Image (spheres, coloured by chain):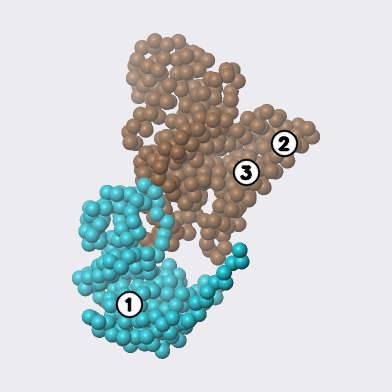
Chain colours: A brown, B cyan
């Protein structure tokens, strides 16, 4: 199954990279990549500008979509596993609110610094996401424990407060001179990779967090039986909870920095994958990451090719395409759905 | 050295629930925890599992203070069959039993041959081979209980804690469950501490009974010594009559109605 999903992802990447204002041939793309990465010497059957388009524009874009999709899906698996709540997604613990507020402040303050290739908006969104999640954890914690229900409620409250703070900023836009369409577009999500260094940095963080999550697979499996049972099975529940929340924040924060607030991928990719490969996290985590990556690559392709030259925020597409599919799946699964 | 040794344990949450409990259980012994609702049976099991730290006193297993063990070390010695716990969808019975190996599996390489062998052993001991490839969420209550017992056995514990192991089971499954447990204590030298509501089952299958009332240990000893009419009446607040079991001679507890059942006034129509 992992192999099948990997092939699906590779196919999506190739297809999405070939498609665009300038059509490129998929076989050419493979040869370019082989020349570049493996030191192969295929004769150029393509124009030099094609190569530039591929390496400078297309590839970062589709690779960015894949990385963001994988990160959101993995974070979704981690949070659904930890919170044992089918509605949990990467934004469950206040991240969306924190990232939105951070990003909106980034637009508002019109700062002009770059940090490792990132402009102020993604940097502040990343910081906002981590701060919101830390705040939620701190609020939910009492007596050394952070009960799941309290975490969920604190996450909901923090997210709502920060979300409305963003709405307030948007209403004041006359006085603040915010560029409303740009802010809205960012809030709805859109993959934006302008430099390879951004992508590499995000990839390293995401890969490390995914590996960390995979090492916790046995704890996450045991947690699906409830905290008490997990404790009886030898899981150090509170410390593993902290680690999962930290890893999930890194995944989500990095995804938000590259793609804004893209909804739905992190909710539905874990569910679909659970139907495909079962609930055990050793397989679920990598499979969901592959599926989320392939899905977002294709959604991003649609986002930039439905109404050219207008780019539709990809968050709208993930909801429009993913939503009906998810509903169909829920109705098809006859068994009661529980985590 | 006792298998389980609770020494002057007081424990609870905000307010203490258990007061100054000293109780030991030996290898191969089945000890029933009896007492009315809210007497502290489940809390005592949580202390024995090492999940709840005593406020004062200590809990020892085979001469080691539970507080000194890591969660994994604890779970390699003590297994719990909880009364009810969430069941994930789409998990095969064999995978569910495999979760009992959580305290043993290697972080990087996962289950070893030894882990797999322990799982198959637990499946065969619990007699659930025919269920092994079914989904846990499709099983009946009795089957599920056996699967959870198998999961606990896969932990290869020295101490098995059962919380109402026969609740929701029919007559045959109640007997089957307790005979399985009884057999394990004899063959595997396992120690069992079980919270039991059914005094009849406690009398038939336990070596000793420990009677809890309002967080205190009222009486502990052979079932014949603990299950006496005055003691039960005082702790449960319910009149009972005791006789001898017709075939096995252990105490037979018969309820005596209180005569308080009233007719509900008929509704005016």
Q: Residues within 10 Å of mark 2 (few under 14, many from 20)?
A: many
- Compared with B199, A200 (above or below) is above
Residues marked 3 and 1 touching at CB (< 8 Å):
no
In the image, B93: left or right of B234? left
Distance of label 3 from label 2 (alpha carbons): 14 Å
User: Share a chain, discs 3 and 2?
Assistant: yes
Residue A88 seen by the camera: yes
Residue drawn at point x = 40 percent, y = 17 percent? A26
Q: Nearer the viewer, mark 3 or mark 1?
A: 1
Residue most extreme to the bottom: B230
Sequence-first tag of 3 and 2: 3
Q: What SS does tag 2 mark?
A: helix
User: Share a chain, discs 1 and 2?
Assistant: no
Q: What SS does tag 1 mark?
A: helix
Check disc 3 and report the residue beneath it: A97
What label sits on residue B200 in the rendered view?
1
- Compared with B97, B81 (above or below) is below
Determine the image quadrant of residue B73.
bottom left
Residue B181 seen by the camera: no
**Front in this rendered view, residue A243 or B99:** B99
**Front in this rendered view, residue A309 or A47:** A309
Residue drawn at point x = 50 percent, y = 80 percent? B260
Q: Nearer the viewer, mark 1 or mark 2?
A: 1
Q: Residues within 10 Å of mark 1 (few under 14, many from 20)?
A: some
**Front in this rendered view, residue B256 or A152:** B256
Distance of label 1 from label 2 (alpha carbons): 70 Å
What label sits on residue A170 in the rendered view?
2
Looking at the rendering, in which quadrant would you find the N terminus of chain A? top left
User: Share a chain, discs 3 and 1?
Assistant: no
Distance of label 3 from label 1 (alpha carbons): 58 Å
């Amino acid at each position: 199954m992992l192999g099948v999903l990997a092939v699906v992802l590779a196919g999506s990447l190739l297809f999405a990279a070939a498609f665009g204002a300038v059509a490129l041939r998929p076989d050419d793309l493979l040869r370019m990549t082989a020349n570049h990465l493996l030191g192969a010497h295929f004769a150029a059957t393509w124009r030099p500008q094609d190569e530039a388009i591929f390496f400078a524009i297309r590839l970062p874009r589709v690779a960015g979509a894949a990385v963001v999709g994988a990160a959101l899906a993995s974070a979704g698996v981690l949070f659904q596993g930890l919170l044992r709540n089918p509605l949990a997604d990467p934004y469950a613990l206040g991240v969306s609110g924190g990232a939105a507020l951070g990003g909106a402040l980034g637009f508002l303050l019109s700062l002009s610094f770059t940090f490792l290739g990132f402009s102020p908006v993604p940097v502040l969104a990343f910081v906002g996401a981590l701060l919101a999640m830390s705040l939620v954890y701190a609020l939910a914690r009492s007596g050394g424990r952070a009960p799941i229900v309290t975490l969920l409620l604190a996450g909901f409250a923090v997210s709502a407060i920060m979300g409305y703070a963003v709405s307030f900023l948007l209403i004041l836009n006359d006085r603040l001179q915010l560029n409303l369409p740009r802010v809205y577009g960012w809030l709805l999500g859109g993959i934006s990779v302008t430099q390879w260094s951004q992508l590499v940095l995000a990839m390293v963080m995401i890969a490390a967090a995914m590996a960390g999550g995979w090492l916790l697979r046995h704890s996450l499996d045991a947690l699906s039986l409830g905290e008490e049972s997990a404790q009886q099975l030898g899981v150090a529940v509170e410390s593993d909870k902290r680690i999962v929340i930290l890893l999930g924040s890194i995944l989500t924060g990095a995804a938000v920095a590259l793609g804004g607030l893209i909804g739905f991928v992190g909710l539905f990719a874990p569910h679909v994958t659970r139907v495909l490969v079962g609930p055990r996290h050793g397989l679920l985590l990598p499979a969901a990451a592959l599926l989320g990556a392939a899905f977002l690559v294709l959604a991003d392709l649609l986002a930039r090719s439905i109404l050219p030259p207008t780019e539709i925020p990809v968050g709208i597409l993930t909801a429009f395409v993913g939503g009906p599919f998810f509903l169909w799946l829920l109705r098809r699964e006859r068994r009661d759905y529980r985590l | 050295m006792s298998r389980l040794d609770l020494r002057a344990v007081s424990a609870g949450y905000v307010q203490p629930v258990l007061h100054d409990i000293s109780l030991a259980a030996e290898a191969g012994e089945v000890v029933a925890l009896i007492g009315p609702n809210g007497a502290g049976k489940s809390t005592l099991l949580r202390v024995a599992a090492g999940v709840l730290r005593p406020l004062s006193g200590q809990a020892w297993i085979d001469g080691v203070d539970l507080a000194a063990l890591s969660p994994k070390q604890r779970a390699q010695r003590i297994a719990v069959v909880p009364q009810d716990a969430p069941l994930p969808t789409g998990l095969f019975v064999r995978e569910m039993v495999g979760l009992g190996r959580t305290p043993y599996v290697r972080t990087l390489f996962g289950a070893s041959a030894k882990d797999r062998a322990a799982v198959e052993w637990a499946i065969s001991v619990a007699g659930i081979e025919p269920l092994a490839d079914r989904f846990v969420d499709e099983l009946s209550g009795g089957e599920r209980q056996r699967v959870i017992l198998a999961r606990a056995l896969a932990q290869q514990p020295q101490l098995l804690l059962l919380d109402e192991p026969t609740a929701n089971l029919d007559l045959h499954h109640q007997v089957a469950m307790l005979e399985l447990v009884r057999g394990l204590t004899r063959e595997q030298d396992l120690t069992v501490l079980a919270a039991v509501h059914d005094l009849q089952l406690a009398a038939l299958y336990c070596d000793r009974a420990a009677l809890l009332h309002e967080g205190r240990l009222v009486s502990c000893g052979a079932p014949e010594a603990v299950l006496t009419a005055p003691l039960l009446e005082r702790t449960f607040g319910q009149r009972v009559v005791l006789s001898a079991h017709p075939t096995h001679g252990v105490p037979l507890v018969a309820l005596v109605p209180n005569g308080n059942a009233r007719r509900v006034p008929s509704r005016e129509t």
